[in-house]
């Protein structure tokens, strides 16, 4: 799975579970920031990946990534998500805890952690974050 897809999954997971907006992400594994914004209204997700200049969104459980021209499915249960990225033909799981999103990419066989930026402040939602944003 591409790193930008994992970041998109982290953003969608966060907004789908918390109902809060995402104004960007810090990828701890890659040690970089992603310019990905997303929000949820009822069962609809809408977002924009500024790094790829690509929109994404749709009605849960399916999200369409216009950049990759593929669908990603999300099954939400509490604070956890199971899903499948049709573009990479890869399963994933994700969870949210205190503003930190962890995504397990089955193709990489590894977990990836993301702090989510609050778009209305200069801080991450994650309480343990030392990143300002």
Image (cartoon, helix red, strand yellow):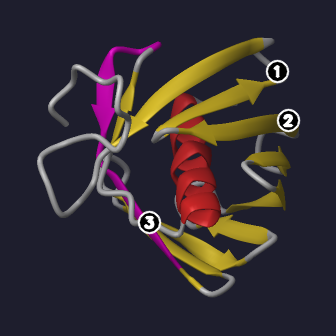
Instruction: From the viewer's perspective, tell me whether residue 23 is left or right of residue 81.
Output: left
Could you tell me how far apart the alpha carbons at marks 2 and 1 are, in whole angstroms? 6 Å
Which image quadrant is residue 121 in?
bottom left
Q: Which percent across, then down, holds residue 23?
A: 29, 56
Residue at position x 67%, y 69% from top?
A: 64
Quadrant containing the C terminus in the rendered view: top left
Q: Nearer the viewer, mark 1 or mark 3?
A: 3
Q: Which residues are magenta?
A: 29-40
Q: Which percent across, then down, holds residue 70?
A: 72, 60
Q: Which residue is mark 2?
A: 90
Which image quadrant is residue 74 in?
bottom right
In this view of the protein, which residue sits in the foreground, 22 or 86? 22
4 vs 48: above or below: above
* Disc with the residue nearer the chain's start (2 vs 1): 2
Residue at position x 69%, y 83% from top?
A: 43
- Residue 107 image label: 1
Q: Which residue is mark 3?
A: 20
Residue at position x 59%, y 42% from top?
A: 5
Instruction: From the viewer's perspective, tell me whether residue 9 is left or right of residue 78.
Output: left
């Amino acid at each position: 799975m591409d790193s930008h897809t994992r970041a998109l999954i982290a953003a969608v997971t966060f907004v789908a579970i918390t109902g809060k907006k995402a104004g960007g992400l810090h990828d701890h594994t890659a040690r970089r920031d992603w310019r990905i914004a997303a929000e949820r209204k009822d069962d609809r997700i809408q977002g924009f990946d500024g790094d790829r200049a690509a929109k994404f969104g749709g009605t849960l459980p399916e999200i369409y990534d216009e950049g990759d021209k593929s669908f990603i499915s999300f099954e939400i249960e509490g604070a956890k998500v199971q899903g499948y990225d049709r573009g990479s033909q890869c399963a994933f799981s994700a969870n949210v805890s205190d503003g930190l999103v962890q995504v397990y990419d089955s193709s990489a066989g590894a977990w990836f952690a993301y702090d989510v930026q609050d778009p209305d402040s200069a801080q991450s939602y994650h309480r343990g974050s030392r990143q300002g944003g």
